[in-house]
Image (cartoon, rainbow, N blue to C red):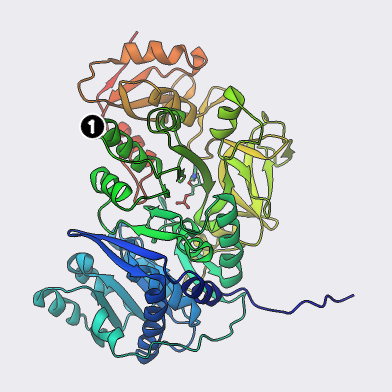
Amino acid sequence: MKSTMQESPLLISRILQSGTLLHADQEVVTWTADGPRRTSYAEVGTQSAQFAHALRGLGVDGDQRVATFMWNNAEHLVAYLAVPSMGAVLQALNIRLFPEQIIYVTNHAGGRVIVLDNSLAAPFSKLLPHLLTLRHVIVNGPIPDEVRAALEAAPQIEGVHDWDTLLAAQPTTFDWPVLDENDASSMCYTSGTTGNPKGVVYSHRSNYLHTMQVSMSLGFNQGDRLLAVVPMFHANAWGLPYAALMVGASLIMPDRFLQAEPLAKMIEAEKVTGGGAVPTIWTDLLRYLDEHPTDTSTLRTVIVGGSACPPSLMKAYDERHNIEVLHAWGMTEMSPLGSVAVAPAGTTGDEHWRYRQTQGRIASTLEARLVGPDGAEVPWDGESVGELEVRGPWITGSYYDNGTNSEAERADAAAKFDDGWLRTGDVGSLTPDGFLQLTDRAKDVIKSGGEWISSVDLENALMGHPDVLEASVVGVPDEKWGERPLATVVRAADSTIDAAGLKEYLGSKVAGWQVPERWAFIDEVPKTSVGKFDKKVLRKRYAEGDLNVETPA
Ligand code: AMP
């Protein structure tokens, strides 16, 4: 029997149209050196129409790629909405990748037009001659003449345009086309610590369903004011921009002001109710809030993801600032939301905290399984450990290949899939009710003798020490055991704790055989382009004898 339901494609244009109509008075607030700049969702709707007309005028009439090289701001939101809605494909470039990676991903995606923040224009102008498929550059904000001249000098570029002037000349409504919901809406490249970054192409349908899940799982409501720190150029901005439009929440966009002090100002001045960022951002903010009285009374819940959240960070926010830290897990390949750690109703005390500290319960629309080293599935018993595999409507089924990928890249990409499931590369356990506890990235697990040591467990224990600001643990070669943990620690200011003291402390938290023999104090844990601990750099520094390693008795 066929249903009687209407067939209506799930499109980004629906999010754009309903969000800017039903929630016309909500706003996107962009932080600037002079304080907040406000744009209502009604204006976002108008600008989206104008931007789409402008792009048509620049030759975007099909599924051409439109790239952005921008911070989180109102104009980036317009691009997020207008580009997919008109049938083109948005590629938000990660501004923190190495130049050669930016060149690779832009050429690989093949964008025709790029939108650029003026604050990034000068460094970008050096890359532009290498971005071979681009024809037009649109600059958001004023730039000096010499920077404009540098952009115009790139031989393939047909025009450099000013955002405001370009949009002002356009009609204020647009006839958004009815697209196939399975068409591409946007693409993101993985941050790729080895080899070239891999492209993931989202569809309208995958984004739409993901947005509904994000809105539901993260508990957003109309009238919320969300501080979107997670960059729009990383992992689809966790779906926050689309979710905000869908539920009618305002967005507070920090632009380039990502330090703790301006973030604290935004929270106070803009009465922020929620937000999303990686643990390092919340760690910096905590330190600031502890020392500088700030009115955070409107802030109920912040979402943390991207790397494991130290339990001590969660407790500190909870106890000292009455702010709930909600732990979530995901990946670029998963749009990115996979799980959210809302403790089951009725749990209290230690049991409640145990749930909160996991990576969370797998989103109900997704399927998950754990695969052991022998390729067999392991049970969901909260103990057995395996590599997590997932599948579902917002999980990628392959990586983008524009025909130039090498055989080796194709083989590498194919190895990420297992009979229709995405291999996440994350290792952990699942409880019978679907709570995921990650112990490591597959490549970061420390294999000591026949046993596995979780680097994340050691880091979390160390970061629970009041004298430790940050700690990262990596496996290093060991003659006897094959591999042993090396702890690298950033001491809190004024702390004089030594390796022997930390070793003793750790011995009271984890099994004795897991306690590292090797210790090094460093000024800062190196971070990747998206703010995660860069363990590759630590391993390299160790291998090159670049760390001052102590081996306390
Ligand atoms: P990316 O695609 O750059 O967002 O990276 C995805 C990877 O980040 C995942 O496969 C995990 O290894 C890691 N990750 C994301 N969220 C978490 C989390 N809550 N806890 C631990 N690791 C995480």
Q: Is residue 252 above or below residue 39?
A: above
* Quadrant holding the N terminus: bottom right
Residue 543 found in image quarter: top left
Report whether residue 197 is seen. Answer: no
Residue 212 rendering spot, x and y as whole percentages: 59, 61
Q: Position of residue 136 (x, y in %)?
A: 29, 83
Q: Secondary structure at mark 1?
A: loop
Residue where numbered disc 1 is placed: 523
Question: On screen, 517 above or below 547?
Answer: above
* Residue for point 73% across, 40% down: 376
Report x, y in % for residue 103: 32, 67
Relative depth, front residue between 332 and 14: 14
* Residue found 70% across the figure and 56% down from its top: 419
- Residue at horizontal 24%, vertical 24%? 548
How many marks are shown on the rendered structure? 1
The relative height of residue 313 versus residue 137 in the rendered view (above or below) is above
Say what amino acid the circle numbered 1 marks: Asp
Q: Residue furthest right?
A: 1
Residue in front for this viewpoint, 43 or 482: 43
Question: Could you tell me if residue 249 is visible in this image?
Answer: yes
Give the camera-side residue of 505 and 345: 345
- Left/right of residue 395 with respect to residue 147 in the rendered view: right
Q: Nearer the viewer, residue 137 or 271?
A: 271
Measured along the vertical axis of the image, is residue 447 above or below residue 241?
Answer: above
Residue shown at the point (20%, 21%) measured from the top left: 494
Mark 1 closeness class: few <14, some 14–19, many ≥20 residues within 10 Å: few
Residue 11 percent across, percent down from the top left = 57, 75
Quarter of the C terminus within the rendering: top left
